[in-house]
Amino acid sequence: MPQPTHLLILPMKAIYFEEYGSAEVLRYGEQPTPTPKANQILVRVRASSVNPVDWKIRQGDLKLITGYKFPKIPGRDVAGEVAAVGDNVTRFRVGDRVYGMPNDGAGNANAEYALLAESVAAFIPERLSFEEAGAVPLGALTALQGLHDYGQILSGDRVLINGASGGVGTFAVQIAKALGAGEVTGVCGPANVELVRSLGADRVLNHHEHDFTHDVSRYDLIFDAAGKSSFTACQEALRRNGRYVTTTPDPAAVVLDKFASVFSTKSSYVFMAKERGTDLALLSAWLQAETIRPVIAKTFPLSATADAHRFSEAGGVAGKIVLTV
């Protein structure tokens, strides 16, 4: 049953910005509440998050992709309750607890209401709170697709996760184990060594003391969740037919890496996570079975999103930054 019309017309509270810049450009105020199309659900957001991509967009680093249409509402993670459904939606009903990553490319999740296409949404596992669910979609989907789709992980592989204590890395360590990796090495700062070990890493390297790129022919797969290295730098550490995967590379490094991979038996992949409901359903099953778990670094109210951006930009965040709505 659709939500009463007057709730869809009233404006909602949201975080938005009308120009690119520092965290100071973020505003908390009223924006139009979106109306679901035939294949969409309207979610009353209870939790969202801040990811590095959010402040990179806000700064204008991706303006060639995001353009100059304002205002923009940031945020790529949605967790909440279905408030209304489009005419063609069959899987979800008003009141269902759902989560997902919007597939419109704009984000729009840091608000009281957000849209999800039915195909990219999933039911929140019973054991997860809204805050825990809000920490999952972007980070976990990135980790799963990076390791499985691009890294082509095989049972018994030796896998290294660079940035293992971050929002993507904490999921990547756990998912690598769930996918059958024989040895998972996590790389992080000294303050987070015990956290990464608790997630199931077989080896944990303090990047202040150990340069993993000098581990000759040790790894079948290197997943650089932090974007702090490059395929060129990692080639020596990869075994024959090894794979290097990253999501946030230095643009100049991409050109060098592609050139280097032409003359190598090893492969390099750069990707961005896709909004995929089937992947999220698999993650939900793992979450319900406690095979994986979200790690929350800190929680902020939606109105304090600018502070959450500053916290993320400062670096060294262990896990995900969650916004309560």
Image: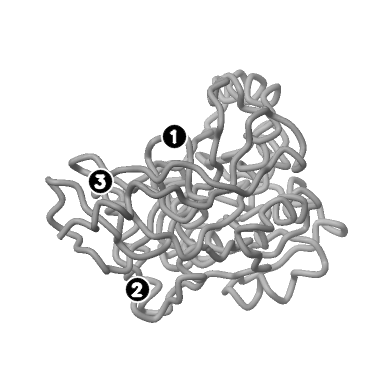
* First in sequence: mark 1 vs mark 2: 1
* Residue labelled with disc 3: 40
Tell me, yes or no, if residue 103 can be seen here. Answer: yes
* First in sequence: mark 1 vs mark 3: 3
- How many numbered circles does the render carry? 3
* Residue labelled with disc 2: 125
Quarter of the picture containing the N terminus is bottom left
Give how far apart the Cα atoms at labels 2 and 3 are: 21 Å
Q: Secondary structure at mark 2?
A: loop
Give how far apart the Cα atoms at labels 1 and 3 are: 15 Å
Q: Position of residue 92 (x, y in %)?
A: 20, 60
Q: Position of residue 208 (x, y in %)?
A: 87, 57
Residue type, mark 2 in image: Pro
* First in sequence: mark 2 vs mark 3: 3
Residue in the foreground of this view, choosing between 280 and 310:
310
* Residue labelled with disc 1: 105
Question: Taking 168 as reference, is 61 left or right?
Answer: right
Q: Secondary structure at mark 3?
A: strand
Give how far apart the Cα atoms at labels 1 and 2 are: 25 Å
Residue type, mark 1 in image: Gly
